[in-house]
Amino acid sequence: MRTKTFKQSTSQINALFQYRDTWFWYGLVLLLLLLWPWVAPAYMVNIGTMMLISVIGAVGLNLVTGTAGLISIGHAGFLAIGAYTSAILFTDHHWPLFPTILASGLISACISLLVGIPSLRLKGLYLAITTLAFSIITTTMILETTELTGGSAGKQVTRPELFGISLESNSAVYYLSLLISVLTILGALNLMRSRIGRAWGAIRDYDIAASLMGIHVRGYKLLAFTVSAFITGVSGSLLALHLRYLNIDSFTLITSVEALTMIIVGGLGSVRGAVLGAIIITLLPEISSRLFALMGGNMQSLSSANFPELKGVIYALIIMLFLRFEPDGMTSRWDHIKRFWSDWPYSRKPK
Amino acid sequence: MNYFNSLVVSGLVVGTLYGLVAMGFAIIYKVSRVLNFAQGEVMMLIAFIGYSVALRTDGSQPMVILGVMLSSVVIAAIIERLIIRPMLGQPIFSIVMMTIALSVLLKSLISLIWGSDPMRMPGVTSVATLEFMGVMLQPAQLVLIAVYLLACFSIWAFLRFTLMGIAMRACATDPTVTMLMGLSIRHLYRLGWVISAMLAGLSGLIFANIYHVGLDMGHVGIAAFPAAIFGGLDSVLGSAIGGLVIGVAENLAGGYIGSGYKEVASFGIILLVLMIRPHGLFGEKDIERV
C-alpha cells in the first residue's frame, strides 16, 4: 500500500508526471479525444473544438496571471490580434496554415512587448490598467481600420489547405486544435519545471527575494507576458479558423473576464487547473441554458432574451465565490480528495 | 484657432468629469492600496438609481440629489462590507479580481434591471446655453465645473485639517502604526469607499443631466484610469488635475484625427507617463524596505 509519496531526488521533483501510470491515464484521455469526432454528433464536435481553443487560451493566461502573478485584463485583445491576423493572412493573402498560426502568435507577442515594457518596469497593478486600456484600444483600432479588418461588418475567414487536405470540415479543425493544445500543455508543463517557471513562481511569491537570488525580475516578467501573448495569439488564430466569421463582439472585456474565470475556477498557477477550468467554463453556458430550459416558462424566456447579461452575472458570482471560499481552485480540491483517500484511516478528523 | 479653443474648453469640461471619478480611484488607492476597477460601474449604478428616483418624483432635483447621496453611502458600505473586508489580508490579486468581478456583476445587473437603451433623465429641460470663448455651455456643465472645484477644495481641506482626514493620510503611510495609535482601519477604509462612491454618484448624476443615462457611462470609469495614473495614483488632487489633461488630450485627438482615436490618445498618455514619470506627476515615489 502506498501511504505517502516521498521525493528523494531532484529528478523526481522535476519529473513531468509524478507516477508512471499517469502516462497511461492521460494516454487514454488522448485516445478518447482522438476518437471523439467519430462517435459524437457534429454539434458536440464543435463544442469540443471550442473547449480545446479555450484550453490553449487559459493555459496561456495562466502563465502570466497564475504563475508569474501579473494580472492581465486585456487578453481578449491578444486573442483579437491573433484572430484578425489569421483572417487577413488566410483570406486576403492565401498564406499556408502553419506559417499563419506562427505569424499570429508572433505579432501578438510583439505587441505585448509594446504594452509590457513600460508597464512591467513598475511594481503593482500598472499592467492590469494598461492591459485593460490596451484591449479597448485594440477593439477601437479594429473597428477603425475598415479596409483591413472589415470594421463593424466583421470579416470572413477562408480555411486553407494542408498537404492537399482541405480544412473545410469541422473535424479537421478539431484535430488541429487538439494537436496544438497538446503541444501547448506539454510546453507549459516543461516551462513550469525549468528555471524559467521556477523563476516566475519566485517572482510571484516575493519579488525582492527573487531578485536577491539573481533572477532578473523585469526580464522574466516580460518573458511571461510575451509567452502568454504568443499562446493567446495562437489560440486566436484557431478561433478564427473555427468561427469562420469574425466579429468584434467576440473580443470584448467579458471575454477577458471569462478567461480569468477559467483559471480562477481551475486553480491559479497550475496547468491542470487551467485545463480543468477551461473545460468547465466552456460547458457552463450549455449547462445553464439547459437548466433554465428545465425550469421552463418565465425563466426560459428570461434566459434566452438576456443571455449575455446572465452570463456576466454568473461569471462574476463564480469569481467572487471561488476567491472567497476556494482561492486555490478545483485542482487543490482534487488534491485534497486524493490525499484523503491515500492516507485514509489517518486522514479522518479526530472527534 | 476657434476650433482649437472650443476643443480645449469642451475637453476641460469633460475632463472635470474624469477628474471627479479619478479622485474616487485615488482616495481608495491612497487609503487601502486597492485599485477599484468597478468605479465606473458604481457611478453608473448610482446614476440609474437617480434616474428611477427622478421618475417617481417627477424630476424634483432635491429629492434626486438626496436619493443619490443616500444610495452612494449605502452602496459603498455594502460593497466594502461584503466584498472588500472579507478579502483583507489576502493577496492584492484577489482583491483586485473581486473589484473586476464586481464591475461585471454591476454592469450585467444594471442592464437586466433597466435595459440597455440610453434614457433621457426626466426633469431635464433644455435651457438656454451660455457662450464662453466661442463655446456653448449648458448650465449643467457649469454646475459640473463648480462641483469639481468644490470637491477638490473640500477633499483638500478634509485631508489637511480634519481628524479623520489626517488619520486617512496616516493610514496611507503606515497602516500598522495607525492601528497602534488606536484608529480603526476598517472605519477608514469604509470612509474611503463612501467618499469615493459619493464622488462617483455626483459625477454620474451630472453626466446623466448633460448627456443621458446609459451603459456607456462605464467609459468614463475607464477614461479616469489614465487620469489617475497621470496625476499619481495616490495623489487625490493630482488625479483631479490629470482628469483635465486627459479630457483635453482626448478631445484634441478626437477633433483632429478622428473620433475613434480618443481612447488611443489617453492610452498613449499612460504609456508616456509610465515611461517618463512612473509614479505620476504628483504621486509619491514608492520606497520599498525589506
Image: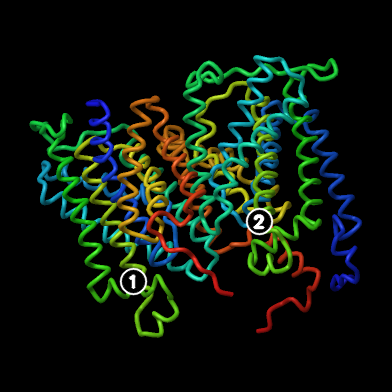
Q: Position of residue B74 (x, y in %)?
A: 28, 60
Q: Is residue A49 above or below residue B47?
A: above
Q: Residue furthest front?
A: B1
Task: Judge by depth and name the residue closer to the eye, B131 or A198.
Answer: B131
Q: Chain of mark 2?
A: A
Q: Position of residue A257 (x, y in %)?
A: 53, 45
Q: Secondary structure at mark 1?
A: helix
Task: Judge by depth and name the residue closer to the eye, A326 or B176.
Answer: B176
Q: Residue shown at 41%/28% (left/top)?
A: B260
> Is label 1 on the same chain as label 2?
no
How far apart in space, not on screen, are marks 1 and 2 (Cα)?
A: 32 Å
Residue on which the image places disc 2: A68
Tell me the quarter of the image containing the C terminus of chain B: bottom right
Q: Residue shown at 85%/56% (left/top)?
A: A17
Residue on which the image places disc 1: B168
A285 relative to B230 in the view: left or right: right
Residue A1 visible (yes or no): no
Q: Amino acid at mark 2?
A: Ala
Determine contact: label 1, label 2, CB under 8 Å.
Answer: no
Q: Chain of mark 1?
A: B
Task: Judge by depth and name the residue closer to the eye, B252 or B267.
Answer: B252
Tell me the quarter of the image containing the N terminus of chain B: top left
Q: Amino acid at mark 1?
A: Met
B142 relative to B262 in the view: left or right: left
Q: Residue shown at 42%/36% (left/top)?
A: B265
Q: Is residue A25 above or below residue A162?
A: below
